[in-house]
Amino acid sequence: MMNILNKIKINSYTYLFILICLLSGYIKNISIIFLICLIHEFGHVFITKICNYEIIKIEILPFGGYTTINQKINSNINKNLLIALGGIIFQSILLLFLIIFKNKFNIITYNLFWQYNIIIMLFNLLPIIPLDGSKIVQLILEKFYSYHKAYYLNLFISIIGLILFIIVNYYYNIDNYFMVIFLIYNTIIYFTNYKYIVKRFLLERYLYDLDYNKIDNHTKNIQDLKINVRHYFKEGNHYIKEKDKIGEVFTSFIDK
């Protein structure tokens, strides 16, 4: 437990946000939001530990948190889905706790807990990078499409979601400027990191003997590789292992 607590880092902007709320007289509000964010992140942490992944850092941001995990891109999709849902699961447990012990709370405190918990939960489910909703969408896409296609489909869905988020906020005059900037910034980073992420995805498959669940003998392009699937490329009357095909890609890249 102490090992996990030592990995919690509070972002410098979070301190500024807390200070502004305290000076504005929103002590109870920020305390409740902060507690809900911690519960959400510990949901991710709890399931991460169950899945035997190493936790590198838990960062508390002004609008939520982010848990950095030491894992391969080619790791188990179902485990990653559970981790992505961990925060929502723990927030749902919090809602159940509030319902059961409703009489133990002051009505104002109860309403604040309920309202903020629902808002944070729904916000995290939005399919916008880097929110949990976007991670869930990508993992579901990876079950049906290649990693390359899932990556770009998730980016497209995220951009559409971000545009709608901005329109809704503008229509209702909600001053979420910092949040919008945060989401735009992370979407741009996701887009610009594509080449690096894909090379890492291929390098993992080349270097490690990963545990594949399925075999695909009809792969034609290196961009068709799926997570949790062992691929063979048919050339003439024989098949080439994906490691050999990936090796050709890296050899070609080095030669250039």
Image (spheres, rainbow, N blue to C red):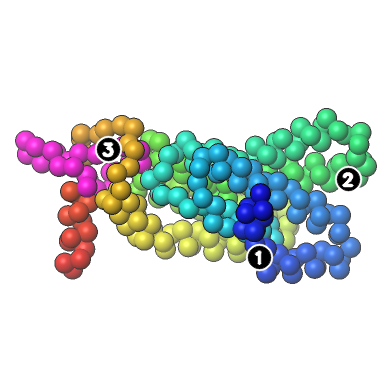
Res 136 seen here: no
Please, what is the three-letter code of the amino acid marked with disc 3? Arg
Res 16 seen here: yes
Cα–Cα gap, marks 1 and 2: 26 Å
- In the picture, measured across the screen, residue 156 lies left or right of residue 173, that is left
* Residue bearing mark 2: 109
Disc 2 is placed on an element classified as helix
* Residue bearing mark 3: 230
Q: How many marks?
A: 3
**Mark 3 or mark 2, earlier in chain:** 2
Instruction: Tell me the quarter of the picture where residue 183 sits.
Output: bottom right
The residue shown at (50%, 46%) is 53
* Residue bearing mark 1: 11
- In the picture, measured across the screen, residue 208 lies left or right of residue 18, that is left
Task: Quarter of the image for the C terminus: give it.
Answer: bottom left
Cα–Cα gap, marks 3 and 2: 53 Å
Q: Are marks 3 and 2 in contact (CB under 8 Å)?
A: no
The one nearer the camera, 39 or 219, is 39
Please, what is the three-letter code of the amino acid marked with disc 1? Asn
| Vertical order, 80 against 22 (above or below) | above
Q: Are marks 1 and 2 in contact (CB under 8 Å)?
A: no
Please report the bounds of the magenta region as a residue range: 222-243
**Mark 1 or mark 2, earlier in chain:** 1
Q: Is residue 107 magenta?
A: no
Category of crowding for the residue at label 2, using alpha-carbon neighbours closer than 10 angstroms: few (below 14), some (14–19), many (at least 20): few
Disc 1 is placed on an element classified as loop
The residue shown at (46%, 44%) is 138
The one nearer the camera, 138 or 174, is 138
Cα–Cα gap, marks 3 and 1: 40 Å
Disc 3 is placed on an element classified as strand
